[in-house]
Image (cartoon, coloured by chain):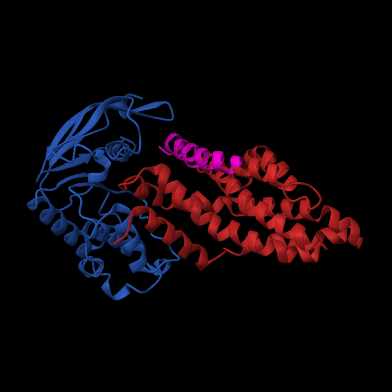
Amino acid sequence: MRLIADRLGVDRGGRPILRDVSFAVAGGEALKVVGPNGAGKSTLLRALAGLIAPVAGDVRLDGGDPEAPPREAMHLLGHLDAVKAGLSVRRNIVFARDVLGGEGDVDASLDRVGLGALADLPGSVLSAGQKRRLALARLLAAPRPVWLLDEPTAALDASGQALLAELVAEHRAKGGLVVAATHLDMGFEAARLELGAVAAVS
Amino acid sequence: MSSPLAAVLRRDLALARGGGGGLGLVFFLLVVTLTPFAVGPDLALLGRIGSAILWLGALLATLLGLDRLLQADHEDGGLDLMHLAPASLELMIAAKILAHWLTTGLPLVIAAPLFGVMLGVGPEATLKVAAALAVGTPALACLGAVGAALTVGLRRGGLLAPVLILPLAIPVLIFGVAASDPAAETVGPLGVLAGLALGYAVLGPFASAAALRLLRD
């Protein structure tokens, strides 16, 4: 499996954010997207997931199901964790799994991210870091080959960051691929993609 | 295991049970209660305008919950999650509209005959109102979804959405009230109302999904 961005150009609100971004990530590889604030890291990930239509170039996923659109092979962990305050932690993850069409074991994935003991509590009691862990549990409950991670270490403590590095390593060992936008070291080796040329000009 | 659509439907029903689902019904009750105070205790007059009041109350009550339809999922990233689902966004929106109607529209339909008694509307007329509401409120919910999608990123969207969709709801109101008239033949207006509902049922999910794709970037 291979995720390819070909001369990708993305505008937001009429302003050019990304121009001529090209890269390819193969299965088992990881790509780290770096750049200053406002360089378009989140925009790139959202464009890869198909949430923003690019104005130029395209995104392809070689080796996936040719019938299904690429987004159905992707996980996007954005700044928003999509945790409903009114539902229990378990209901939250069951919903995410069912919406994404996964068949993973919900309790096992909650245990893995350290939320097993909180499964019956409402989402409203979770801290920012715990919500992030719940979002990580989505990656396990609904296995998909492409992970798009936007600042995945935000709000995570040291053990959470170690957990993330572990999950990414396991995912890559199984042939999955990861594109992560970050400022920090995330504890795994990855190719680098520097953004920011356009932002610097304008 | 269940399909993405069933998951959305079940979750929205659970969230509505969790809080605020009955507010529209209370609002409907208040409109019906306040009208006799404004019009005066003239039972004959109330009976004549009762079905129109029921329709107006139901229409306004439908507008009340619109801001909840898409705004929360827009703000917490739930819509991003649904976008990645192995089902089209149009069907996801349709599932959300159905859940919205089941929790806000259906209670109005069930309560209408009860509230009709308070206005002195005859039994035959109240049943006609309930039947017309059962056909008309899904149309209003679909229209409301378009308004909710168009205002999804706006801070005061909760006020703007009703202003946007009320003009489009006029045909539903006209034929709904016509189909509730106890003295007249109502099969014709009810048929037109059903036609409108089917049309809006197609338009609603597609227009909402298109608006969401354009506005959320």
Residue B123 in sight here: yes
| Near-viewer residue (A35 or A151) | A151
Which residue is painted at 57% across and 41% down in the image? B147
Q: Is residue A155 left or right of residue B109?
A: left
Is A120 a magenta residue? Answer: no
Question: Which image quarter: residue A38?
Answer: top left
Quadrant into which the C terminus of chain A falls:
top left
- Specify start and end residues of the magenta stretch as a single range: B195-217
Query: Is most of the magenta stretch helix, strand or loop?
Result: helix
Rendered position, B199 above or below B120? above
What shade does chain A have?
A: blue
Q: Is residue A64 left or right of residue B6?
A: left
Residue A13 point in image, percent of width and height: 44, 30
Residue A169 point in image, percent of width and height: 11, 54
Rendered position, B104 above or below A125? above
Quadrant into which the N terminus of chain A falls:
top left
Q: Is residue B210 left or right of residue B141?
A: left
| Near-viewer residue (A16 or A135) | A135
Residue A72 point in image, percent of width and height: 26, 44
Residue A149 in sight here: no
| Near-viewer residue (A155 or B17) | B17
Task: Give the chain coloured red.
Answer: B
Question: Which image quarter: residue B28?
Answer: bottom right
Which residue is painted at 76% across and 59% down in the image? B124
